[in-house]
Image (tube, rainbow, N blue to C red):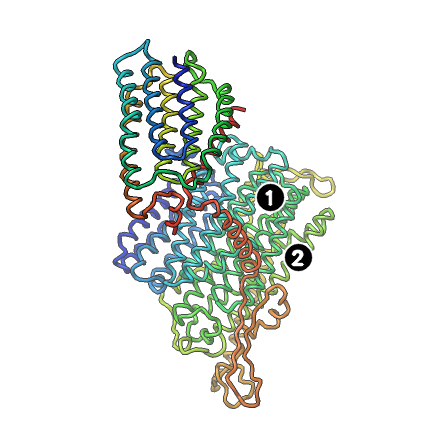
């Protein structure tokens, strides 16, 4: 815990220093990078210790706050969520050392770094907090710091609007959390997490209400549909390094909170799992569909965050269903898959946002249809971005595959071995997850090909060059992690099991192994206690994946070598892509992002409601024609805007009471007092 | 004797409700002030100490003579002699006052206040004064009527303070009286300015200032 406190203190000191160094951008950037890297080293060490089976660490300090206590606790669940916080924090700080100066006005640079460190520190506290009040305070700090960064990300109306939307959404969510923690505190006697475990014994109705409060409150931060509306606005508006941190890590604090509270609540009712499963399916499928229809690279990635949060919710939902139905194997695999996807999504989505930031820095636009041909100009960015695309599409040998595989595995077990409801859930999950995976692959085929392949569609794209070394280093490190996590998966199962074991249903009671009857009524054989017993089933396929990956790598290497061999000594020509034999091709004849995705967008038109603005050629002579399409957020337009408009109109009627007549105001007071007096003395 | 004074205070309140002339309002709030001052002195006559005596005397002088003396010139300067178009007229106010009296008497039986050796009329009379003051503020439009309404409310509070506590802290009582004095001073100035700026002192017109 000392190391973690040191990391925390260092990050806070960084926040103060960055503010002080605001007028010296270079010094500020390097100081911040140093702080980020050292804090990550300090912080990751104890996390690794706890994940490797070390003891739970705690920290208590008096706090002059009523009902609150300055209590921190590092158990396997916290440690697991801290890993991406520190990893991505360090790498985005490294990336930002050269990037942030592009994205933020010079006068705001110190402030932006300061908010960045504050965001890091508050996220660390959110994950470590062992007290409801401390948790909420840190939670609010996270919101404020990241909202400041969203607003600082640009100097225009859109950023302020995005920041405002984000702040309002977050505060609405926090309102639910406040009620949640107050209820938990009332029922268990204090706001300390240590006592919240008693909530498992509460009546079912109350537990259900607490669960729903947690889903809405934490889901707003995590981006569950339809509470996701702030995400596609805030992520594109923030500086890319912050988008990476927000999308990769910050929205996961919502998942952390949800998991933590669900673990407190003990044995889940069946409808909890169904709720999460439903949310996961809707978020996953609609998230990827909306992503498909976007033209803005970062907006596209933001919708993919909604999709991946959906996948995580699918895993967690399956886990809860398994627990509820008394199928620990399904439960362990579902929970482990969902949790592992948290880490994986942090890594590849961080990578993708950093890649998008590199593209943005070089070409100056997030518009997909003004990019093109960047792979030749930015090989590092392009290569690492490709790794990110493959990972997020859930393709082996990268990490996205591993976590989705665990979820699939759990779902298969549910179908094969479970009772009927579990079978239905498993089937739904398999179908939904396949659809999500396929659409995600289509979407990233679009994103990667339009941005990096073909020929440049704008002068800025043609003039682009590779980004600076720190940015490349950060992206390369994340790309490497995408591969490493997948390869290390067979060995990481034990750590993952420790995280799942935080749930009381799996908590090993003392012994680390239990005896089960051997095959054919043989002697008892020892097997690991807790969830590892079930997760260990995945070890064999994981090992197969590792070997398959090596095989695949050898195959790709072989094909490349063969191609090089065949091309050796020949002249290699270059021409525009997709010229279709036309004599005077231009880059504008290439497929654009919209045309690439058009068949799918058309298919899902009832959901997406893409608006097309066509000015076609309808006379005899050639005239100027134009086409534009726009896919707004369905839920923002059709649900939240009417809702808040209605609330506003309803409240507007109340202004009749505030009529400016002094006599009326005194009358209100009189009536209130008289009613209170008579009511009190009745 | 105490009860007689209290009943007279109640009657003076009804008189305040039933008039629409500003001059008369000011006169009667003065009469009420004299009654209260007498009540303060008489109620504690047995335990009369220097500080109680000072409080009673100051109250009598301030409420009975100084306030009317301050307010009357204002009424003359701003040329307002009557409530022309109140929200609730004298007749309606008086009827509402009767209702308020019944409610106060009922509340008085429910509300038990320590210091029970005082007259049982103190609590209902206090509540009635407060209600009357609020009724004046709510139903009248001229700023001067509302000042009188406020003074009537304060008189109710004073009645309770004197009537129920033998040893009400001297500082509190004298402090409140001082506050009242300053408040009335400020109002006289404020109303003159109001008249100078808008050429009327109708508080209902203030809503035009709303942005």
Q: Are marks 1 and 2 in contact (CB under 8 Å)?
A: no
Q: Which of the two residues, B126 or A439, is positioned nearer the viewer here?
A: B126
Q: Nearer the viewer, mark 1 or mark 2?
A: 2
Q: Along the horizontal axis of the image, is B127 left or right of A20?
A: right
Task: Please determine whether, in this image, residue A272 is positioned above or below residue A564.
Answer: above
Q: Quadrant of residue B47?
A: top left
For label 2, the residue is A430
Q: Is residue A442 left or right of residue B108?
A: right
| Residue holding disc 1 | A531
| Residue furthest out toward the top | B46
Query: Is residue A43 visible in the rendered structure shown here?
Result: no
Q: Residue A323, image x and y in percent?
A: 64, 43
> Residue B105: x percent and y percent?
49, 21
Secondary structure of the residue carrying numbered label 2: helix
Q: Quadrant of the C terminus of chain A?
A: top right
Q: Is disc 1 surrounded by few (<14), some (14 to 19) or many (20+) residues within 10 Å?
A: many
Residue A122 appears in the picture as rendered: yes
Above or below, B75 against B154 in this view is below
Label 2: how many residues lie within 10 Å, few (<14), some (14-19) or many (20+)?
Answer: many
- Please state if A553 lies on the left or on the right of B27 as rendered: right
Q: Chain of mark 1?
A: A
In what quadrant of the picture does the N terminus of chain A appear?
A: top left
């Amino acid at each position: 815990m000392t190391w973690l406190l040191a990391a925390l203190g260092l990050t806070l000191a960084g926040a103060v220093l960055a503010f002080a160094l605001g007028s010296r951008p270079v010094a500020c950037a390097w100081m911040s990078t140093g702080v980020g890297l050292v804090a990550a080293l300090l912080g990751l060490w104890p996390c690794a210790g706890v994940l490797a089976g070390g003891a739970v660490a705690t920290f208590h300090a008096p706090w002059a706050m009523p009902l609150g206590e300055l209590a921190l606790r590092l158990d396997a669940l916290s440690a697991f969520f801290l890993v991406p916080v520190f990893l991505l924090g360090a790498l985005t700080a490294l990336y930002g050392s050269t990037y942030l100066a592009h994205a933020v006005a010079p006068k705001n640079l110190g402030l932006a770094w300061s908010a960045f460190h504050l965001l890091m520190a508050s996220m660390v506290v959110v994950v470590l907090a062992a007290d409801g009040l401390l948790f909420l305070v840190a939670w609010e700090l996270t919101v404020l710091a990241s909202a400041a960064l969203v607003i600082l990300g640009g100097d225009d109306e859109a950023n302020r609007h995005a920041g405002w939307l984000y702040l309002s959404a977050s505060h609405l969510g926090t309102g639910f959390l406040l009620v949640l923690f107050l209820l938990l505190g009332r029922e268990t006697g204090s706001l300390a997490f240590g006592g919240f475990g008693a909530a498992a014994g509460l009546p079912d109705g109350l537990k259900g209400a607490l669960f729903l409060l947690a889903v809405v409150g934490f889901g707003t931060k995590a981006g569950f549909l339809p509470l996701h509306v702030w995400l596609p606005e805030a992520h594109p508006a923030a500086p890319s390094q912050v988008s990476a941190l927000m999308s990769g890590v910050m929205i996961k604090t919502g998942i952390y909170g949800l998991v933590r509270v669900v673990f407190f609540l003990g044995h889940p009712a069946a409808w909890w799992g169904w709720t999460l499963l439903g949310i996961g399916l809707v978020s996953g499928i609609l998230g990827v569909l909306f992503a498909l229809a976007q033209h803005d690279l970062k907006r596209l990635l933001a919708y993919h965050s909604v999709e991946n949060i959906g996948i995580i919710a699918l895993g967690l939902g399956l886990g809860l269903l398994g627990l509820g139905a008394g199928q620990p194997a399904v439960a362990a695999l579902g929970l482990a898959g969902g949790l592992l996807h948290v880490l994986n999504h942090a890594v590849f989505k961080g990578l993708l946002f950093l890649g998008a930031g590199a593209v943005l820095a070089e070409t100056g636009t997030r518009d997909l249809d003004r990019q093109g041909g960047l792979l030749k100009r930015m090989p590092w960015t392009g290569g690492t971005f490709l790794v990110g695309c493959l990972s997020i599409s859930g393709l082996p040998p990268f990490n996205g595959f591993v976590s989705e595989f665990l979820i699939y595995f759990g779902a298969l077990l549910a179908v094969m071995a479970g009772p009927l409801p579990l079978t239905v859930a498993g089937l739904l999950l398999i179908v939904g997850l396949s659809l999500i995976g396929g659409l995600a692959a289509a979407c990233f085929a679009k994103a990667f090909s339009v941005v990096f392949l073909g020929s440049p569609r704008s002068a800025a794209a043609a003039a682009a060059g590779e980004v600076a070394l720190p940015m490349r280093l950060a992206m390369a490190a994340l790309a490497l992690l995408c591969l490493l996590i997948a390869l290390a998966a067979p060995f990481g199962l034990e750590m993952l099991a420790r995280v799942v074991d935080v749930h009381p249903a799996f908590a090993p009671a003392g012994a680390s192994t239990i005896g089960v009857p051997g095959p054919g009524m043989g002697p008892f054989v020892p097997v690991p206690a807790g969830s590892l017993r079930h997760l260990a089933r995945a070890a064999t396929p994981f090992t197969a994946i590792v070997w398959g990956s090596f095989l695949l790598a050898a195959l790709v290497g072989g094909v490349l070598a063969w191609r090089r061999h065949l091309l050796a000594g020949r002249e290699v020509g270059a021409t525009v892509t997709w010229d279709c034999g036309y004599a005077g091709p231009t880059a504008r004849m290439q497929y654009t992002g919209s045309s690439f995705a058009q068949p799918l967008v058309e298919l899902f038109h009832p959901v997406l409601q893409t608006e097309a603005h066509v000015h076609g050629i309808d006379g005899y002579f050639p005239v100027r024609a134009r086409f534009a399409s726009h896919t707004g957020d369905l839920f923002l337009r059709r649900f939240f805007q009417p809702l808040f408009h209605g609330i506003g109109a309803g409240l507007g009627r109340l202004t009749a009471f505030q009529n400016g007549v002094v006599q009326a105001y005194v009358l209100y007071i009189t009536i209130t007092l008289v009613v209170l007096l008579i009511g009190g003395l009745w | 004797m105490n009860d007689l004074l209290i009943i007279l205070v109640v009657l003076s309140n009804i008189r305040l409700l039933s008039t629409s002339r500003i001059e008369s309002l000011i006169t009667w709030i003065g009469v009420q002030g004299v009654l209260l001052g007498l009540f303060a002195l008489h109620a504690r006559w047995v335990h009369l100490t220097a500080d109680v005596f000072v409080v009673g005397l100051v109250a009598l002088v301030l409420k009975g003579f100084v306030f009317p003396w301050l307010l009357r010139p204002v009424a003359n300067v701003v040329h307002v002699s009557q409530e022309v178009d109140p929200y609730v007229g004298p007749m309606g106010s008086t009827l509402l006052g009767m209702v308020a009296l019944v409610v106060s008497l009922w509340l008085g039986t429910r509300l038990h206040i320590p210091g029970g050796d005082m007259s049982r009329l103190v609590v209902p009379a206090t509540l009635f004064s407060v209600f009357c003051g609020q009724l004046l503020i709510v139903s009248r439009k001229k700023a001067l009527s509302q000042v009188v309404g406020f003074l009537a409310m304060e008189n109710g509070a004073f009645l309770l303070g004197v009537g129920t506590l033998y040893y009400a802290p001297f500082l509190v009582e004298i402090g409140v009286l001082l506050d009242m004095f300053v408040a009335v001073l400020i109002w006289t100035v404020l109303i003159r300015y109001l008249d100078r700026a808008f050429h009327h002192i109708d508080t209902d017109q203030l809503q035009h200032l709303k942005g």
